[in-house]
């Protein structure tokens, strides 16, 4: 796809999972990359596998949840390549805790990473895109932006918030040449479960069988690139149970709630 050739693509959460897969997929399309995540050593590993010349890839370590430094990182990214064509807000963190046990500190951390960090990053890059009247903002949301499950109230809340914020942004900027794509994955083979936080804000370090059997991140990344080329507003990349959950909640909300209470759907 010549659509992506020489485009500057900034990916957060690029050290693993969907973000890492996107780095490889964009590399095949001839893009220039900015890779961000907290773990610099993992970013360097991804950079090495991309095998791009140093003038076509930048490793920019950052913690998206450190809101106060997001503009600083954005300025570095914009300066390095002279701009950003595609911003992919992929960084995220989940939890595995009932609401009654969930501390406000953990809730704030999840919102800072999943919602506020990406919003601040978007606002930092958006003026450049609007000035050029072109650009693409991709937000990796989740099917949990449309449905709910037990023990993930804060995570689900951030994904619902992303839906509202970026749907609104889209109608404000689409006529000015900036496209906004919301991606709603279901179960994908990533470390999201192992990295989920417990009531004390510590990673649970446990696998989830449904996630282990989920979609290949490379498949998801390819669907994302295809959706951008087609100018889509939103895509759901998920298996049959997740899609049925979305339909059930939309058309039969009481039945959906009954299934979820009994743990018989997802």
Image: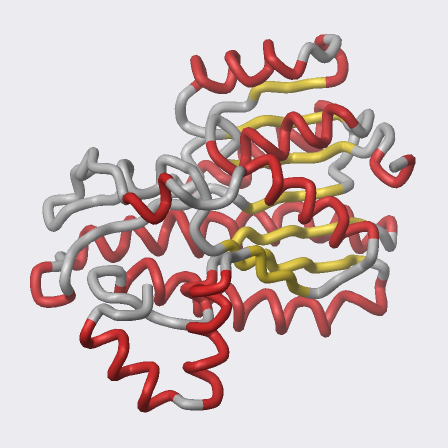
Q: Find residue 173 and report its horizontal and vertical position in percent.
A: 76, 66
Please give left or right for residue 261 compared with residue 43 in the image: left
Q: Is residue 200 above or below residue 171?
A: above
Tally of marks: 0
Q: Quadrant of the C terminus?
A: bottom left
Q: Quadrant of residue 68?
A: top left
Could you tell me which residue is drawn at 54 percent across and 35 percent down? 19
Q: Quadrant of residue 48?
A: top right
The colour scheme used here is: secondary structure
Please give left or right for residue 22 compared with residue 13 in the image: right
Could you tell me which residue is drawn at 11 percent across and 45 percent down? 200
Q: Is residue 161 above or below residue 36?
A: below
Could you tell me which residue is drawn at 47 percent across and 74 percent down? 246
Q: Find residue 74 and report its horizontal and vertical position in percent.
A: 60, 36
Please give left or right for residue 97 compared with residue 84 in the image: left
Please give left or right for residue 181 compared with residue 142 in the image: right
Q: Find residue 131 and report its horizontal and vertical position in percent.
A: 83, 51
Q: Quadrant of the N terminus?
A: top right
76 and 134: which is toward the camera:
134
């Amino acid at each position: 796809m010549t659509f992506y050739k020489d485009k500057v693509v900034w990916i957060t959460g690029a050290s693993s999972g969907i973000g890492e897969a996107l780095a490889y997929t964009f590399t095949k399309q001839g893009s220039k990359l900015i890779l961000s995540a907290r773990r610099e050593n993992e970013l360097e590993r991804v950079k090495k596998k991309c095998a791009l010349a140093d003038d076509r890839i930048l490793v920019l370590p950052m913690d998206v949840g450190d809101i106060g430094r997001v503009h600083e990182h954005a300025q570095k990214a914009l300066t390095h390549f002279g701009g950003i064509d595609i911003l992919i807000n992929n960084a995220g963190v989940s939890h595995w805790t009932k609401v009654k046990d969930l501390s406000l500190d953990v809730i704030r951390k999840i919102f800072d990473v999943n919602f506020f960090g990406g919003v601040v990053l978007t606002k930092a890059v958006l003026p450049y895109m609007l000035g050029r009247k072109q650009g693409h903002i991709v937000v990796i949301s989740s099917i949990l932006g449309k449905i709910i499950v037990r023990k993930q109230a804060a995570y689900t809340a951030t994904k619902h918030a992303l839906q509202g914020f970026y749907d609104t942004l889209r109608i404000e900027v689409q006529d000015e040449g900036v496209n906004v794509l919301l991606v709603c994955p279901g179960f994908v083979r990533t470390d999201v479960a192992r990295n989920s936080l417990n009531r004390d804000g510590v990673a649970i370090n446990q696998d989830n069988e449904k996630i282990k059997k989920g979609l290949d991140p490379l498949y998801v990344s390819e669907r994302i690139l295809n959706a951008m080329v087609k100018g889509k507003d939103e895509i759901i990349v998920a298996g049959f149970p997740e899609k049925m959950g979305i339909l059930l909640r939309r058309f039969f909300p009481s039945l959906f709630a009954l299934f979820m209470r009994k743990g018989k759907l997802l």
